[in-house]
Amino acid sequence: MAKKRVVLISFNYANHFSLALGYLKSYAEKEQFILQNTEIVIVDFDAEMHDVRQVVYYLSQSKPDIIGFSCFCWSVNKILETARVVKMIFPHIKIVLGGPEVGPVSAKYLEENRFVDVVVKGEGEVTFAELLKYYIGRGRLEEIKGLSYRVDGQVFENTDRPLIEDLAEIPSPYLEGVLVPRDKVTYLETYRGCIFRCGYCFEGKNFPRPRFFPEDRIKREIELIMSNPEIKSFHFVDPIFNLKKERLVKLAEMLSTANHFGTELRTIEIIAEFVDEETIDLFKKANVKSIETGPQTVNKDTLKNVNRYFDKEKFEKAVRLLEDNGMEVLTDLIIGLPGDNFFKFVKSAKTLIALKPTTIIFSILHVLPGTILYEQSQAFGLKFDEKAPHLVLDTPTFPFEEIDKAVVMAYSLDKEYNIKPSL
Amino acid sequence: MLQYKEIFLGNQCNNKCLYCLYRQKDLSPPDFKTVTESLIPGKEDGIALYGGEPTLRYDLVEIILTAKKNGCRRIKLITNGRTLSNSQVLQQIISAGCNLFEIKLWGSNPDLHDHLTQTPDSFWQVIQGIENLRQLACDKFICLRILLCKQNYTDILNMITAGINFGVHRIILSIQDHNLALKELIPNVQMAIQVSILNRIWILTEGLPFCVMQGLEHHIGEIYYKHDNAMNLSTYKQHKHCKNCVYEEICPGVEAEYFNHFGHGEFTPVKGSKYLQDMRVLYG
């Protein structure tokens, strides 16, 4: 039997590559049956530079049997357009979608897009591997947990798949040579899940219990990345880098020991309120140069509505400690959270400005499938665009025209506050 | 919303604007030492240099360099824009560390602008200055300060259009003439705000009482900014009827002279506002 060609595609910004697709390939290829009967290729397209026709041209040349798309709110529209055109030209190609944008609403995507064959729900590694086995002759589609699919025009949704208990089952895409670390765009993941349940976020609701990758594997990944002098900086994709002090101690030690070329850690996400003097020492030891944190809003009612923890005093102290120790602090604000209004948003901006973080990042609320806000949108009276990227349109306290004005104001403020030095 | 320490660099100017606050005043420029001593190292996150016309200071670049050296992150120049038409001077200012500009405009055409500045060619120099700024590859923030009076308020949309075409990052509509009836001005201001927002440019007003801005409260500059000297609100006052207005605590009122010209008939105390509580929090 000829090997099935499998192309895994993502659209990324700023030269990034998909860690998720690396996991899919490295997990699937663990199994000899899949390794012997498939050829899996990962292709990262640029979300801005590459258009649909370019992707279709690539596919016309690579002639895959199966295409797996990694779908996020920023990429799904282009993916659907690509898949639609591909299916028109090559109807035999199986179109498989996965990722946080489609998983929570898999049946909807199948019903609205007849060219999609399968949607993988939730964590994809095991489900996608089982799907590949089915395509090369083993197993039954209806028995694969975590899958929705179409048969003879009809949509079926299988039961959800439990989370992978032991993340050690997933081989490291870096250590396996599936992904090659590159400067500035390499992400490492040391755990999955979040202890918080922020209403706008996918992670905590869907992966409520933190599950950790083995420490020795993380150590080897760090050593691999830091052994390359061309890699000046990299990131961690962990939802909260400073989740637990004892883990941070170990990570800082690993990073410090492996760091022979002054490699920096940039834009790691942290909870500012957990930062103390000891954390700062550990960050310095790990050579952290910039961090990103909330608070998204500072207004009590809004924070309560979105289950967001914010302690102004601790937050302020953290910003000072981090900046005084030479680390850049990127803070985030979201426009359009339930309970906020135009002037409450301005108050949040004003509060942050007074704290003098290095950067304030303004964004508009995305009511993402699979989040608490998505599920409770009616209760909150949230109107949002059903089409990705699911921008909030109107709330009982924040009517559309005021959201729009806040966005225009934020653009101006962003330009003024975050101005880059001319020297 | 960003607060700048306002630093007066003297009232020397190369325009003779009809509505200039400083034209008749003898305000001798502070010397370099006085200016730079006011820049306490590590204290000021942002400063705004204003005049007169600050670009006429021979030591402007030195002042900017000193501010930068003292840790000042944002240095803003409030200027009539004419000097920026000299691209070499502009480059020096930028290289020294100043990349935020607030540029004053009196009209969308040379006849009107030059008449109000009482300076031939000043319009084209401002336009050239903004164009020079626009063409620089460095990061910069450009705010267009549109100065309003009875001679130019009907030109407001043309000036807004100029700002849109220049891709400015903010527009401020600043009232300079207290002989201009607000009932005539306000419809133009309302239209200007709509056009500006439609074109994705944030726009604020300066010097307008809150009661005439109902429904457009988001654009009242005084809610966001506390001015020290650059904006002279010290001569503003409220009418006795303003005591019945929900905005009484936070509205600066109007220029005292205005009541002498037009009385108080245009001002109706605002009985209630859904924004009041949140606005108070900001203003406080």
Image (tube, coloured by chain):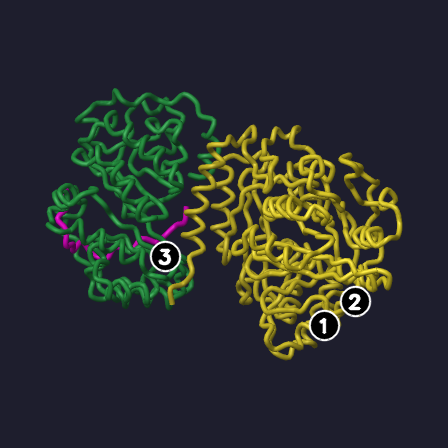
Chain colours: A yellow, B green
Answer whether residue A310 is visible to the viewer in this image.
Answer: no
Residue B3 is one of the magenta-drawn residues: yes
Mark 1: which secondary structure?
A: helix
Residue A215: image tag: 2
- Label 2 crowd (10 A; few <14 / some 14-19 / many >=20): some
Amino acid type, label 2:
Glu
Q: Which quarter of the rendered picture does the C terminus of chain A lie within?
A: bottom left
Instruction: State which quadrant residue B225 falls in.
Output: top left
Range of magenta residues = B1-18
Instruction: Find disc 1 in the rendering and name its residue.
Output: A254
What amino acid does circle 3 point to? Lys
Main SS of the magenta part reads loop
The reply to whether residue A204 is visible in this rendering is yes
CA separation in Å, label 2 and label 3: 46 Å
**Is there a contact, CB below 8 Å, between mark 2 and mark 1?**
yes
Indicate the quadrant where residue B196 lies.
top left
- Asked if badges 1 and 3 are on one and the same chain, I answer no
Q: Is residue A298 left or right of residue B284?
A: right
